């Protein structure tokens, strides 16, 4: 009788396709590319998600215009992190040189509006990616629970949880590295 011995590690990963930005450009539908792996971004966001995105962009643009900051907001723009990693945060703030096509350097601020199908990825994989790439501020907005989590890079390059600094009512401010101050209003975000 012959017995098979199994290797200690799986060989399945050798056969998983690895995609690049060139592949990504040919896909139809809503996708992100994480370390060469295609990640479906469906179904499309629901009404509360899109209302929160619109209200966040409005607040950002009002602050940027009032202060004449060298920053702009983007909703749904691809950030090409590397040739095998492309993500599309719900909202990004880019300061300094603005992208002509896709963003190819880290945004100053990234915001994800949580939904049932994305919350876990936003709190884990994207959080780790944004922290590793130096995104100064990361907000996680949950329209269903009406909560906002605020993570900001510390001097050691690791995220610090600044959620406790957000008042339950009223305005709070995120100061961007270039000195621009974005005032958010929890009530406006969830109205």
Image: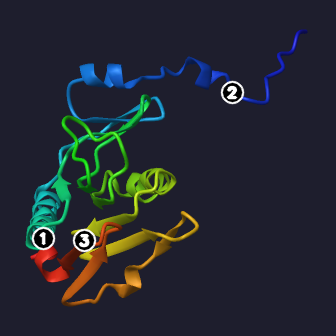
Against 38, residue 138 (above or below) is: below
Question: Whole-percent x and y of residue 100?
Answer: 19, 37
Q: Is mark 1 on a helix, strand or loop?
A: helix
Q: What element carries label 3?
A: loop
Q: Kindly check if marks 3 and 1 are in contact, taking CB atoms under 8 A apart as contact.
A: no
From the image, state whether disc 3 or disc 2 is nearer to you.
3
Question: Whole-percent x and y of residue 90?
Answer: 24, 53
Question: Quadrant of the image for the C terminus?
Answer: bottom left
Left or right, 54 with respect to 18, comes to left
Question: Whole-percent x and y of residue 47?
Answer: 10, 58
Spatial CA span between label 3 and label 1:
13 Å
Q: 10 Å neighbourhood of mark 1: few (<14), some, or many (≥20)?
A: some
Q: In which quarter of the image is residue 189?
A: bottom left
Q: Quadrant of residue 87?
A: top left
Left or right, 115 with respect to 132, comes to left
From the image, state whether disc 3 or disc 1 is nearer to you.
3
Left or right, 118 with respect to 160, comes to left
- Please identify the residue farthest to the right as the structure is shown: 1
From the image, state whether disc 1 or disc 2 is nearer to you.
1
Residue indicated by mark 1: 59
Q: 10 Å neighbourhood of mark 3: few (<14), some, or many (≥20)?
A: some
Against 22, residue 81 (above or below) is: below
């Amino acid at each position: 009788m012959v017995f098979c011995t199994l290797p200690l590690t799986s060989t399945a990963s050798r056969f998983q396709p690895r995609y690049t930005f060139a592949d990504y450009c040919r896909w139809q539908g809503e996708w992100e590319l994480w370390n060469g792996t295609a990640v479906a971004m469906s179904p499309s966001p629901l009404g509360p998600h899109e209302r929160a995105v619109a209200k966040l962009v409005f607040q950002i643009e009002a602050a940027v215009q009032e202060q004449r900051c060298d920053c702009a907001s983007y909703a749904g723009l691809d950030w090409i992190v590397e040739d095998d990693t492309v993500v599309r945060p719900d909202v990004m703030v880019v300061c300094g040189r603005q992208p002509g096509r896709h963003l190819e350097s880290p945004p100053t601020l990234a915001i994800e509006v949580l939904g049932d199908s994305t919350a876990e990825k936003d709190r884990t994989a994207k959080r780790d990616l944004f922290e590793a790439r130096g995104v100064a501020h990361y907000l996680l907005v949950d329209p269903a629970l009406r909560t906002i989590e605020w993570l900001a890079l510390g001097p050691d390059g690791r995220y610090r949880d600044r959620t406790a600094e957000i008042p339950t009512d009223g305005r709070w401010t995120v100061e961007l590295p270039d000195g621009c101050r974005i005032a958010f209003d929890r009530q406006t975000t969830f109205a």
